[in-house]
Amino acid sequence: MDTEPHTAPVDVDHAGTAHDSHVHPVNWAMAAQATLHCLTGCAIGEVLGMVIGTSIGLHNAGTVALSIALAFVFGYALTVRGLLRAGLPFRRAARVALAADTVSIAVMELVDNAVVVAVPGAMDAGITTVLFWTALAVALVIAFVVTTPVNRWLMGKGKGHAVVHAYH
């Protein structure tokens, strides 16, 4: 892996728009931290969606759709919460969260749901089985590994979590 820091031009005006006037280094640790933040919200929504969908007998497609929707809700909510604490008004915080997290959450959801669906019997195993929980845990780990370089690249371009970091 490359250990040289990349640079990310980040400056945010009062409208929440990124500009290219400041340069900040982006390294693997920063990308991993951003991905872990994303993973937290995604995992909450993903697990909740899988548990609800499986428990009430939704078809696999319905369970996956519910999981994805909840992953986005919880992922955005965690970012908005931090931005509100930083003093941003709700509408601006919501816009920044959408800009910062959408690609990361989408990649994470694509990967982790593809893995869970690909594990034979995992979706039909039920929430009381080791297969269900192991497949879900492995899927989230793989999603983290795949999404971290995506976040590093985005941050290197002044996008993704680089936008959020400008407010902290």
Image: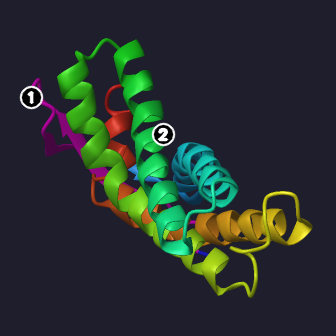
Q: Amino acid at mark 2?
A: Phe
Q: Position of residue 162 (x, y in %)?
A: 35, 45
Q: Amino acid at mark 1?
A: Ala
Q: Which residues are magenta?
A: 2-22
Q: Is residue 7 above or below residue 150?
A: above
Q: Position of residue 166 (x, y in %)?
A: 32, 32
- The front one of 44 and 152 is 44
Q: Is residue 78 left or right of residue 53?
A: left
Compute the Cα span from label 2 to label 1: 24 Å
Q: Position of residue 163 (x, y in %)?
A: 30, 41
Label placed on residue 167: none
- Which residue is the site of mark 1? 15
Q: Is residue 114 above or below residue 136?
A: below
| Neighbours of disc 1 within 10 Å: few (<14), some (14-19), many (20+) | few
- The front one of 32 and 107 is 107
Q: Quadrant of the N terminus?
A: bottom right
Q: Is residue 19 magenta?
A: yes
Q: Nearer the viewer, mark 2 or mark 1?
A: 2
- Which residue is the site of mark 2? 74
Secondary structure of the residue carrying tag 2 is helix
Q: Position of residue 43 (x, y in %)?
A: 62, 50
Q: Is residue 24 left or right of residue 16?
A: right
* Residue shown at 52% from the left, 56% from the top: 67
